[in-house]
Image (cartoon, rainbow, N blue to C red):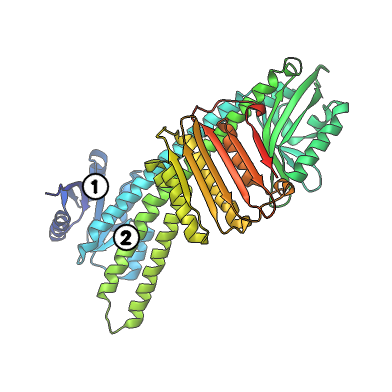
Amino acid sequence: MTTKKKLGVLLVEASPDDALRTIAKLKQNSYAVEYLQVSDAATMQNALTEGKWDVVLCSYDPPGFCGPDALKLMQAAGIDLPFLFLSHDHREETITQAIQAGAGGYIFKDSLNFLAPAIEHSLREVRTRREHSEAQLALQKYQARLHSFISNLPGMAFQLLLDNNGIMSFPYVSEGGRSLLGFEPLDLKQNSDLFQNILYPNDRASFQQSMSASANNLTLWNWEGRVVMAQNGKIKWVNMRCTPCKMDNGDVLWEGIMTNISQSKFAGIGLKQSQEQLRELSSHIQDAREQERLHIARDIHDDMGGTLTAIKIDIAWLCERLDVRQPELLAKAKGIEALVDRCMKSANNILRTLRPSVLDSFGIIAAIEMEAEEFEKRTGISCPINQVDEGVEISPDASIALFRIFQETLTNIMKHAKASEVTVDIANRKEGVDLVISDNGCGFKEVDRQKPRSFGLRGIQERVAHFNGKVLISSKPGRGTTVDVHIPHASPLPASNDMMPQRTLF
């Protein structure tokens, strides 16, 4: 026996007969209906204030209180409920006016078959809006925590921009600039010469050279030097570490942190702390990115997926009722149905790319096997999987890192390798997870890795470094490429560069 779904209905209707037909139709659709019928503004106002309703069904047929007046009353009260119009009026301009007023649907009273689906659709839309509002609030809280985190860093977080004319500026400077450099953040953003003027004379050349090298090669900018404090003339050692990004207009933007390493120049402590903080910040950004991908995937699945399914059902219903003597209309409907199928397939592909459900449900090995199958279908390149699994639990963070590394490697192979076969070995052993991806493609030279847009391999190294793992990328022209990754099962810990072996063999 099917359990009926409870549905609280506020029915704005002057016609007793229409009200009875509406409620009867809902009960036929397996709803346990609790409803209140109102026919004037005052009663509706009290009902909205005192009752808890799932949906408002409102007549659009005069005479009496109905239509846009009832919708405006609910909107003025600031209540977010599904609101559907019911009417005997089939005119297109009436329907358009009703929808433009903000109603969630317009149902014909003489054909209530679409009432239940319309209610379910509206309920989903309201849930989506509420979830979006909650997500926005969570995002604001996250931004506040991030601002607090940056404000408490023992240094200055910043953005540094170098335009095509060689002019340097600071689009963003955190509050840490006040204690580190002795300048208000706003002053430094408005006048970058303040920073250049306090550079120690003997260190200005190295500053300019390292900036030029980073801009030309889009490599990490790691500079340390001395500044002379304008307030008291004291010399302070600072370390500036930031990552470049080439903008569409050719400008180069760095994002990073500047720290006081005066003590570390003598004791070697300050530099290590700075690297640990950068690692934490990088990990935090990576986690935020994965969470955002997860939220987007859920939104696509819950909203777009449901909508496309409803459209497909409606088109199927329409095709069954089209006159066979009008084949052009039937062909058009079939064409629309095919387009919907393509959209659903595209949505599923996007969902798999953003966050494959098999990864959360069955683990990294199953996810890699499925990704390899999709790769074979898309490219025709053979991609067999050899796997060993000793049953050791892999952390979610390590799983998503391995999956992203696998995705990035397959993308590089598809774009550049010209390979006919890819072999994958994945082994989950007690000490850690090993992932080896080899192709028989054209390979590459060391100089190719230094190209400005070679972010893929750098991204792989950064992901592995977060877990204190090892990555070996070996390649020779004409002999293919092998990416060998090892991630230990132990939790990731801050480490200096000498704790993260990373080699490339050519």
Q: Which residue is mark 1?
A: 44
Q: Nearer the viewer, mark 1 or mark 2?
A: 2
Which of the 4 image quadrants contains residue 46?
top left
Q: Is residue 372 left or right of residue 190?
A: left
| Foreground residue among 206 and 404 | 404
> In the rendered structure, which amino acid carries the disc numbered 2?
Ala
- The answer to which of marks 1 and 2 sits earlier in the sequence is 1
Instruction: Name the residue located 39 percent from the left edge and 64 percent from the top edge.
Output: 341
Relative to 494, is 77 above or below? Answer: below
Instruction: Name the residue located 57 percent from the left edge and 52 percent from the top edge.
Output: 411
Q: Residue 428: x and y, percent?
A: 46, 36
Q: Residue 339: x and y, percent?
A: 41, 67
Q: Quadrant of the C terminus?
A: top right
Q: Secondary structure at mark 1?
A: helix
Q: Which residue is mark 2?
A: 310
Kindly tell me whether residue 379 is visible in this rendering.
yes
Q: Residue 427: x and y, percent?
A: 48, 39
> In the rendered structure, which amino acid carries the disc numbered 1?
Met
| Foreground residue among 95 and 301 | 301
Q: Is residue 105 left or right of residue 402?
A: left
